[in-house]
Amino acid sequence: MNTAVSLTSREEIEVHRFSWPVSIGIPVLAIFLQVFLRVRFLTVLDLPLLVTIFFAVARRRPIPGMITGALIGTLQDAWTGHPIGLFGIAKTIVGYLGSSIGVKLDVENPGSRFLMTFAFVLIHRFVYMAISLQLVGGSEAWIWSHTLLSALVNGLAAVVLFAGLDKFKLRN
Amino acid sequence: MENFFTRYKNPLALMAVLFIQVVALATQVKRPEGAKPGSTGSGTRLIRVWTVTAFTPIEKVFVSTGRFFRNGWHDYADLRGARKQNIELQEEVARLQMEQVRLRQDADQARRLQALLDFKEKFITKTVAAQVIATSGTEQSRLITIDKGSKAGLRTDMAVITPDGIVGKVKDVFGSSAQVLLINDHDSGAGVILEHSRLQGIVKGTPLGELQINDIMSDEKVETGEHVITSGGDRIYPKGFSVGTVIAATPDRDNDPFLAIKIKPAADLNRLEEVLVITETSDNSRTASSGTEPMRAADILSQRLPSVPKVDPNAPKTPGGGQTAVPAAKPSPTPTPANANKPVSPGTEQKTAAASGAAKPSTSTTGVAATSTTVGKTGAEAKKPSSGQNQSPTASAAATPAQPKPTPAATGTAATSTVAGKTGAETKKPSSGQTQSPTASAAATPAKPKPTPPTTGSAAASTVTGKTGAEAKKPSSGQTQVPSGSAETAAAKPKPTPKKTATPKPTNSSTPDQPSATPTATPATQEKPPR
């Protein structure tokens, strides 16, 4: 009971909203940059995932968070050669977890943002691999070094990116 | 119950969304492969079409704008060295033109020889140039998007190349764009041949984006740096395109009896900007033929020899006429008139042939042997268009009179060397089982009549025995190898007796109805060598 009170009070205090142009424009821009900027570094950096985490954590509402993740992931899937849904499912789960965890943790701190993103990248990768191997029958290989490097890079990028995106928040 | 839904609203919503997505995913995975091509507007793929269609115009604007400014600067920078570069290019063009003449003649003969084998080759007849406008953006999928689609005639499974090598194949086609699956994607594959060892395999992408061949046995010798080309067996990539070079060949720990051969792609797959899509190919198996009547290889070659009087194949033969091994067994189309009687070997090759022949006399083969060599190879080997093939006959015929003391065997050796595409060292080695081409002997006969040991009538046998044991075991149209040593003999004492050299060998299984090459080859030695 105490927990519920705590959740409610925290949600009332720190829930953020975003304008429609930002809600649509930022994810689209992230996908656009990820896909069209042919920079090798960007293949390690997963901008759509970072945006998904940011919106999910900031809104702190699981349903909008997972819908945001689902939409971003599905759009991202369209550019891959894989069946559509791999990124969609992975980012849906990340969006849901991000929204849920945002209620319980202080996600404004750079350190927690780094750790949170680091963990979400691993989760995202794990879910993606699980779906790819079990459902689609893909032949992906889990490479620890590469995955950890990707998580590290994305975690560091999240600290910078989230600080910039904080300016678009509309406080109640 | 209402309390339950209220309490677990979020998890239930999550499960519902995931369920929908999994069902959608399963629908795609279970879609029959046959329904895929061309079904760009059906079912779940519609989202892909919409997304790509929505983003493509924006990206085109970005790309074209950026390219405009970048090209403007490059144009200015390039002009600075244009004059010097122009001079260099003109020299290069002149050199290439000369080389083109030689290569054209090489190609003519290669086609003729291919025609002898009913060789079918795919030629590219139409390509579409396209610009890369996007990538997949992830490492899990190595895919690029190009700015040409079905409106430009693109279809799925078309090969995409660059001048450096193959890039991939078209995976999905939209109206004004298409997605290309790169060859280093782990879902990709292409049939390849290692250029020197002629080993065939399938190159596939790895999860790390490398190219690897996994189906070559570990007892095969694969050297780093060896060039890898497409085999054409996958019916997507035409044969002969560069794939890359071998950078490592180690035993595959996961796949024990096989090698893990890593390939460095010839095309820079990470920096693609412009690509060519092969939209049309054609089978060409009769480029060398214009007539309908089959013609024997000896007749074709007699036409190709310079200043050789045309011999009627039905005319009575001399008893020991130089025989060609294979052609009689396999009717072949007549060559094009334009190529008939044309000297096919440029002077440079003649010099090479004469020089190498004079350096060390060895097995004697003439132009006829050249044909036999090619025909005597296995299908895979013979299908390889060897650029040097047409040098041999003329080289031997022409080089003989040019040399003050040419040994027929020596010239023949040079010819064999060129034809087989082997190194000089290989062909200079007189193998113990070498046989001689009677044609070679016959060619030298009038000039220097000196007895030579009996030889076989098969030039092909001569060539085959000049190879390694393994190669000699390859099907060679029934040539019989007869130990002769006459090559060395003829070289050392170049005074063959016409009758001896003309004696046909009954052991040659492919000689019964061969035309006499003796009258055709003999005058050639007395003629002035062609340029």
Image (tube, coloured by chain):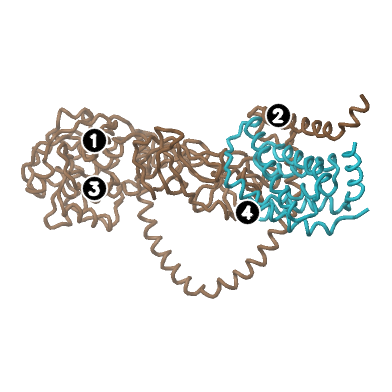
Chain colours: A cyan, B brown
**Can see residue B336?**
no
Chain letter belonging to callout 2: B
The amino acid type found where label 4 is placed reads: Gln
Q: Secondary structure at mark 4?
A: strand
Of tags 3 and 4, the one toward the viewer is 4
Q: Earlier in the sequence, mark 2 or mark 1?
A: 2
Quickly name the residue at label 2.
Answer: B26
Kind of element beneath mark 2: helix
* Quadrant of the snapshot with the N terminus of chain B: top right
Residue identified by numbered label 4: B131
Q: Are marks 2 and 4 on the same chain?
A: yes
Q: Which residue is mark 1?
A: B469
Estimate the spatial distance between the alpha carbons at disc 2 and disc 1, rounded to whole Å: 55 Å
Which quadrant of the view contains residue B194? top left
- Amino acid type assigned to the residue bearing label 1 in the image: Gly
Chain letter belonging to callout 4: B
Quick one: B266 or B403, which is closer to the camera?
Answer: B266
Q: Find residue B123 and report its horizontal and vertical position in percent.
A: 48, 43
Q: Cβ–Cβ below 8 Å for labels 2 and 3?
A: no
Crowd band around label 1 with a 10 angstrom C-alpha radius: few (<14), some (14–19), many (20+): few
Q: Are marks 3 and 4 on the same chain?
A: yes
Q: CA distance from mark 2 to mark 4?
A: 33 Å
* Residues tagged by mark 1 and mark 4 found on one chain of the structure: yes
Chain letter for the residue marked with disc 3 in the picture: B
Distance (Cα) linking label 1 and label 4: 50 Å
Chain letter for the residue marked with disc 1 in the picture: B
Of labels 1 and 4, earlier in sequence is 4
Q: Relative to B29, is B453 above or below?
A: below
B512 lies left or right of B253: left
In the displayed image of the protein, which residue is found farthest to the top? B1
